[in-house]
Image (cartoon, rainbow, N blue to C red):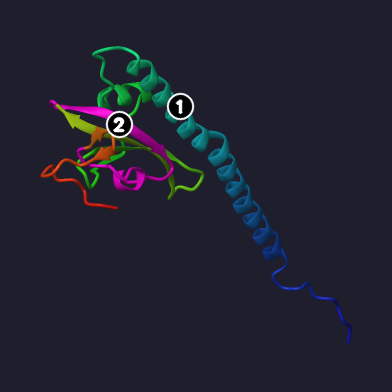
Amino acid sequence: MSTTPSKPSGGNGGNTLRIVLFAVLGLLLIGLAYDYLVARPGVDAAYDKIAARSVELNKLPDTYFTNSDVQELLGKQPSRTFEDSNGELVEVFSWRSGLPIKTHDLFAVYKPSDGKMLFNRHAKFAYESSNDVSIYAGETIVLTDEGPTTPPGMGGGGSR
């Protein structure tokens, strides 16, 4: 009786698994590179564009920076909008991240005035409501010698 060595079963399957794992690892590395080299810098650049334009327009009298100006400046439409707790309009501009299920967001906040939505502030990556940003958000404030006060009957947001 002669004994011949037999090939171990599944020897080729190990190579296939290794190739699949390296392909997944390669895709994840490409996604990570895209996230840090394209998506995040895109949000940072848009944030800086808005800040520079806002400063430029604030120097000019009778000039307004509206939501349509921001959209034109960025060259894109917001991916979604919502209203903050004090009635401000928030437009969310999104950049796809390295993972298909995630985005990096820029939030532009506007105050309504005479039928226009005037730029108020912006944030990148995470949104903070007006109440988180300022203790005076939504309140009418009068500056006096004693400091800022809320006039009686003006519907301030309460004491803090």
The residue lying at 13 percent from left, 27 percent from top is 115
- Asked if residue 128 is among those painted magenta in the image, a careful observer would answer yes
Amino acid, disc 1: Asp
Label disc, if present, on residue 120 of the rendered structure: 2
Residue 95 image point, x, y percent? 42, 38
In terms of secondary structure, where does tag 1 sit? Answer: helix
Instruction: State the CA–CA distance, disc 2 to disc 1.
Output: 15 Å
- The amino acid pointed to by label 2 is Asn
Closer to the camera in the image, 128 or 147: 147
Q: Magenta part of the protein: which range?
A: 114-140
Residue at left 42%, top 21%? Answer: 52
Give the image location of residue 79, x and y in percent. 31, 38
Foreground: 156 or 56? 156
Q: Is residue 111 left or right of residue 1?
A: left
Question: Could you say which is closer to the camera, residue 145 or residue 139?
Answer: 145
Chain-order first, disc 2 or disc 1? 1
Query: Circle 2 sits in a helix, a strand or a loop, which is it?
Result: strand
Quadrant in the picture for residue 81: top left
Image quadrant in which the N terminus is located: bottom right
Residue 101 is left or right of residue 28, and the answer is left
Question: Residue lying furthest bottom in this view?
Answer: 1
Residue 28 x/y as whole percent: 58, 49
Please tell me whether residue 41 belongs to the stretch shown in magenta. Answer: no
The numbered dot on residue 48 is 1
> With respect to residue 97, does 6 lie above or below?
below
